[in-house]
Image: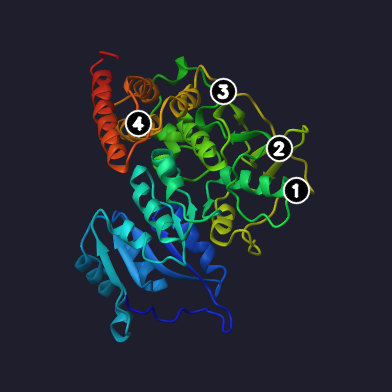
Amino acid sequence: MPRTAPRQGDLPGRTPRDVVLLGSTGSIGTQALDVIASHPGRFRVRGLAAGGGHLERLADQTARWRPEVVALAAGTPSSLRQLLGARHPELAGEDYHPEILAGPQAATQLAGSFPRATVLNGITGGVGLEPTLAALRAGATLALANKESLVVGGALVRRAMVRPGQIVPVDSEHSAIAQSLAAGVHERGLTSPVVSGRSEVASLVLTASGGPFRGRTRASLAEVTPGEALAHPTWSMGPMVTVNSSTLVNKGLELIEAHLLFDLDPERILTVVHPQSVVHSMVTWRDGATIAQASPPDMRLPIALGLTWPERLAHVEDPLRWDAAQAWTFEPVDADTFPAIGLARHAVSASATHPAVLNAANEVLVDAFLGGRLPWLGIVDALTEVVEAHEGVADPTLEEILAVEDWARAHAREAAGRRREGRGA
């Protein structure tokens, strides 16, 4: 692979940490680059991967960070090179020629190319599974923001790990749990946020903002629009994650992720609505103590920890203020209006492939909702139908998981079509 050009801001005498960003033009990727830019000399961007929907942004990132490899899921190497030349003519006089990978396997190829790097997987959706497996098998540290790959792959992901502590969670909730676990254990020198069989833990508590429809009844949600579902009160995220937050499907996926990351039974993983989004999650211990992690609702802190765990960078975000009155509130989840968490608990207990069905079908149904082909209430109604129709596979291979996803997408399209035509389930 070609050598990268020197980066502005590298500090002499200090070896920067190698980073590969998957999903670099999305919300997680752009915020990760903000963190990297604000800590010059601490990181070296070795690779960038993007879907191709924001090619100009990828060209600008490539010119700014000079990675050795750029991966593009949709598009051609020549299209990116032409755009680089047009937008950044200054590159013409420099000896910088990145390798450009293209096609559906480009991100997977990149993820397995730097075994000593930290690979931040910020890809959205189940398509992130194969890059996750590639990074783990190569021996890289995986900063995991793509919860879907763990939900879909489950045991495959855990079997792909070649050393303890190889996965560092980046979702704010799971980062909070990792931090709380590290603060509460009595063993000295623990550095891995992923624990197994922690007998002193009574329960994990996932906090949920409640999304834009907190407090609403099911009847009042029959005519909500995509614009309303995308108007999240506290977080700025991509459309898929934002709609998932409105249905609480995201919290169901996070429950499955927490079960797989921290080896705790799903029944001991609780969910509570916390509208302020300041307490990101908690751990309750067997003696009755609860340890919580609190910070402003900003992804830069868990992203930074994902890149440097267990070290903490300085000045990642402004800390909470304690010199003014404030209130934090906690409410139970309305399971009648938001049944997705219960559906996820059922899925993860049913079989190894039910979570993959849940995730793949949900992606189709959210797309149908955003495209005006399915009402908001139809998302979880149709999702329940598809999950309950699945028979399950006990110990699936990757090929079987991919086949199950195809089955789930086809059945989700059928379920959405019936609801669009007014025929229900």
The nearer-to-camera label among 3 and 1 is: 1
Q: Earlier in the sequence, mark 3 or mark 1?
A: 1
Check disc 3 and give the amino acid type: Gly
**Position of 334 relative to 157 (above/below):** above
Task: Please identify the quarter of the rendering in which residue 305 is found.
Answer: bottom right
Q: Earlier in the sequence, mark 2 or mark 3?
A: 2
**Position of 374 relative to 171 (above/below):** above
The nearer-to-camera label among 1 and 4 is: 1
Which residue is identified by label 2? Answer: 200
The nearer-to-camera label among 3 and 4 is: 4
Q: Residue 257 — which label?
A: none
Which residue is identified by label 4? Answer: 357
Task: Note whether residue 294 is visible.
Answer: no
User: Dividing the image into 4 quarters, which one contains the N terminus?
Assistant: bottom left
Which residue is identified by label 3? Answer: 215
Number of numbered discs overlaid on the protein picture:
4
User: Dividing the image into 4 quarters, which one contains the C terminus?
Assistant: top left
Check disc 4 and give the amino acid type: Val
Q: Choose between 175 and 363: the one closer to the eye.
A: 175
- Asked whether the residues under the numbered discs 1 and 2 touch, taking CB atoms below 8 Å apart as contact, a structural biologist would say yes
Tell me residue 24's x, y (percent).
Answer: 40, 59
Tell me residue 239's x, y (percent).
Answer: 40, 41
**Position of 38 relative to 347 (above/below):** below
Q: Identify the residue at image location x=49%, y=19%.
A: 337
Q: Earlier in the sequence, mark 2 or mark 4?
A: 2
Mark 1 closeness class: few <14, some 14–19, many ≥20 residues within 10 Å: few
The nearer-to-camera label among 2 and 4 is: 2
SS at mark 4 in the image: helix
Q: Which of marks 1 and 2 is nearer the N terminus?
A: 1
- Please, which colouring scheme is shown? rainbow
Q: Residue 186 — which label?
A: 1
The nearer-to-camera label among 2 and 3 is: 2
